[in-house]
């Protein structure tokens, strides 16, 4: 739940927070007033100030002090090279609405500040929403590559594949991994990964300059089973072996150690590896807490973009 700010928060921070709630969260001024513990009239003035002072347009342009402090704490506690914390929306609202613009801004910064990058990408609902927040840009010098196959075993493609959507937004060359996410056997996996177009994508993914990924829980209601990438028996096997989360399909346990064998041995893709390049995870929400805590413990990620609520939980 968003912090009850009242008058303890600096006025400019409070205006930015109110503008965020109004324009991104779709909250009424009455709701903002109740959430922040202020009068409706003051809430109205704060929203007006957020626009007049350029604190917020579609994106928040003023870093709220509480978020900056959480970013510093996350970096210090978990040894992260990058941390971005978005203002929390009220309880019950989708936290991805808050983190997506912040993540989009970070990807835009990477694209603008560097030359000839190879950027590898995961897939999923969160990353798709991030890409939808991206402005139209022109960076044909960059290359985008998938970390994982983009189809279920029956051949159906996921609607949450992001690489082509991002390439369309930024004008970059892109190398999707046009394979099933999971092979039926290790022999099939070796065949798929030996294909020429797969070899090109895999080489780029292994040598990427930075990766942006989501994170998933391991459960019978996890997106990877709902979307048909894995079946009930495989989920049961992962749970029996202590899996709590997955990054681009690769399952790991509560200590942040990737599992060997099983469904992990059948993935058509590249495991994100912080030893090779920065791995920035974009995630928030209660269902992500356990997986994020494990990934941070095992140093599976080197950057995190999340919201206040999740950041406070991880630090607690």
Image (cartoon, grey):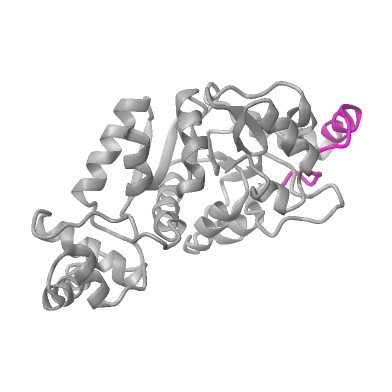
Q: Which of 204 and 178 lies nearest the eye of the viewer?
A: 178
- Examine the rendered structure and indicate whether residue 31 appears above or below residue 170: below
Q: Which of 155 and 199 lies nearest the eye of the viewer?
A: 155
The stretch in magenta equals: 176-194
Instruction: Give the x, y percent position of residue 10.
Output: 10, 55
| Residue depicted at x 34% and y 61% | 90
Instruction: Give the x, y percent position of residue 141.
Output: 56, 47
| Residue depicted at x 36% and y 73% | 26
| Residue depicted at x 61% and y 28% | 252
In which quarter of the view is residue 238 placed? top right
| In-image side of 72 versus 281 (left or right) | left
Instruction: Give the x, y percent position of residue 59.
Output: 34, 62
- Examine the rendered structure and indicate whether residue 99 appears above or below residue 16: above
Instruction: Give the x, y percent position of residue 160.
Output: 65, 56
| In-image side of 296 versus 245 (left or right) | left
* Residue 86 can be seen in this image: yes
- Examine the rendered structure and indicate whether residue 126 appears above or below residue 72: below
In which quarter of the view is residue 259 placed? top right
| In-image side of 129 versus 175 (left or right) | left
| Residue depicted at x 17% and y 57% | 5
Q: Quadrant of the N terminus?
A: bottom left
Q: Quadrant of the C terminus?
A: top left
């Amino acid at each position: 739940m968003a912090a009850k700010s009242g008058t303890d928060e600096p006025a400019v921070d409070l205006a930015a927070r109110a503008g965020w709630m109004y324009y991104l969260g779709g909250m009424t001024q009455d709701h903002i007033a109740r959430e922040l513990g202020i009068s409706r009239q003051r809430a109205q003035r704060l929203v007006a100030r957020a626009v007049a002072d350029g604190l917020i347009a579609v994106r928040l342009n003023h870093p709220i002090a509480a978020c900056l402090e959480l970013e510093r704490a996350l970096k210090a506690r978990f040894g992260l090279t990058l941390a971005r914390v978005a203002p929390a929306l009220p309880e019950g609202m989708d936290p991805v609405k808050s983190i997506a613009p912040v993540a989009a801004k970070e990807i835009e910064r990477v694209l603008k500040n560097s030359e000839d990058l190879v950027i590898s990408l995961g897939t999923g609902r969160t990353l798709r929403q991030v890409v939808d927040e991206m402005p139209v840009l022109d960076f044909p010098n960059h290359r985008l590559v998938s970390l994982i196959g983009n189809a279920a075993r029956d051949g159906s493609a996921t609607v949450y594949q992001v690489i082509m959507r991002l390439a369309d937004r930024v004008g970059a060359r892109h190398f999707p991994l046009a394979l099933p996410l999971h092979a039926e056997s290790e022999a099939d996996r070796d065949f798929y990964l030996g294909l020429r177009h797969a070899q090109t994508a895999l080489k780029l993914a292994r040598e990427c300059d930075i990766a942006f990924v989501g994170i998933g829980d391991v459960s019978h209601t996890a997106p990877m089973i709902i979307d048909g990438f894995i079946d009930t028996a495989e989920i049961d096997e992962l749970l029996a072996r202590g899996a709590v989360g997955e990054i681009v399909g690769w399952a790991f346990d509560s200590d942040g150690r990737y599992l060997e064998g099983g469904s992990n041995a059948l993935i058509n893709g590249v495991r994100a590896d912080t030893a090779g390049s920065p791995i920035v995870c974009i995630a928030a929400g209660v269902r992500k807490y356990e997986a994020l805590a494990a990934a941070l413990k095992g140093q599976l990620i080197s950057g995190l973009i999340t919201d206040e609520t999740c950041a406070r939980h991880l630090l607690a």
